Amino acid sequence: MIKATISLVDSNSLLSLFGARDQHLRRVRDQLSVDITHREGKIHVAGHDVAVAQATEALEQMKALVERRGSLSEEEVSEVLAGVTGDAAVSKSAPIEVSTTACRLRPRTPGQVRYVDAMRNYDLTFAVGPSGTGKTYLAVAVSIEALKNDEIRKIVLVRPAVEAGESLGFLPGDLQAKINPYLRPLLDALYEMMDYDQARQYMEQDIIEVIPLAFMRGRTLNEAFIILDEAQNTTVSQMKMFLTRMGAGSKIVVAGDITQVDLAPHTRSGLADALTRLKEIKGLCQVRLSNADIVRHRLVQDVVRAYEDGPKKRR
């Protein structure tokens, strides 16, 4: 492990360099797996030699941008990080326009670039990968972009109501209150990209619908962007039912992690089955995301890897 030190810009520019709630610094830290601290007017970077060199170069470029322009955007941070890591496809990828307030998102890894391109270019996309790779988040972003561009008339966010080791059946309240915990991750992504009042208005107008998988039976959805989250928790018959809801002018994204199946023992996952059964069909795309595409806290990659490797044997 090595360390590097960077002299800071003047105190008036610190907020622009660090970002709100230090989001720019956290972005560099999490993506490059380095430790970053700020004290005595300097930024200190520690980690493996290549990562420290990349982080130092990124911070110097970000510092130069702040000194020149007085501000620093998320998009500029993405471009800087893509440049220092050599991910040219990331820096050249088209941003995702997600709201009327000109909010823009950009995929952060080559795997995410392939995923976004697939959703834009194919009517049926399967995305498989571990937690934190942006499967749901990016799908919601691309669906909002399609709605904004009048490519579709409706967004349907779907999730199977399968419990991950805990029983929610005795929660108080009506049906909506009982199913809300299952749908919360989809709502969280939606509210992060769209003004809350606008999102609620769209849901009241049935332009955006967030529903359990069971509510899809018997429907045909035309000109809709339909996202199935946690697809590993569908059965084979449920997956068939879901995929056949697709109507004219619609797109479907099926996202899941086949290592986190919460179905009853000996029940085949509909996602695993579909990946094999449908792989020869033209007009659909399967995208595999890996640990390298995890963009949550830097520890998430290590946690996922530890569970994949299994417990270490005692000597």
Image (cartoon, rainbow, N blue to C red):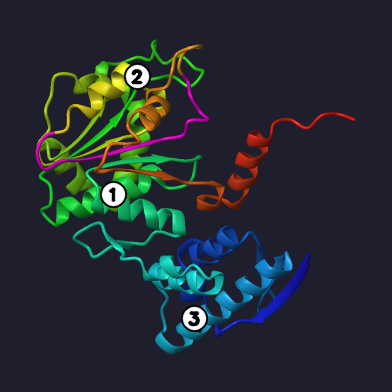
Q: Circle 1 sits on which residue? A: 119
* Disc nearer the start of the sequence (2/3): 3
In the rendered structure, the answer to whether residue 238 lies left or right of residue 84 reads: left
Give the Cα separation between the discs numbered 2 and 3.
55 Å
Q: Please name the residue that numbered disc 3 is placed on.
A: 13
Q: Mark 3 and mark 1 in contact (Cβ < 8 Å)?
A: no
Asked whether residue 195 appears in the rendered view, the answer is no
Task: Estimate the spatial distance between the alpha carbons at disc 1 and disc 3, rounded to whole Å.
Answer: 38 Å
Residue at the extreme bottom of the image, as rendered: 68
Q: Is residue 48 left or right of residue 185?
A: right
Quick one: label 1 or label 3, which is nearer the N terminus? 3
294 to the left or right of 98: right
Q: Is residue 252 magenta?
A: yes
Rate crowding at label 1 as few (under 14), some (14 to 19) or many (20 or more) other CA atoms within 10 Å.
Answer: many
SS state under label 1: helix
Quadrant for residue 239, please give it. top left
- What residue appears at the point 38 percent right and 69 percent down from the top-left corner? 75
| Residue under the image location 78 percent in, 32 percent down | 312
Magenta span: chief secondary structure:
loop
The residue where tag 2 is placed is 236
Quarter of the picture holding the C terminus: top right
State which region is magenta. 247-262
Residue 108 vs 162, above or below: the answer is below
Disc 3 packing (10 Å; few <14; some 14–19; many ≥20): some
Number of the front mark, 1 or 3? 1
Q: Quadrant of residue 189?
A: top left
Position in image of residue 121 (x %, y %): 24, 53
Q: Amino acid at mark 3?
A: Ser
Instruction: Report helix, strand or loop for mark 3.
Output: helix
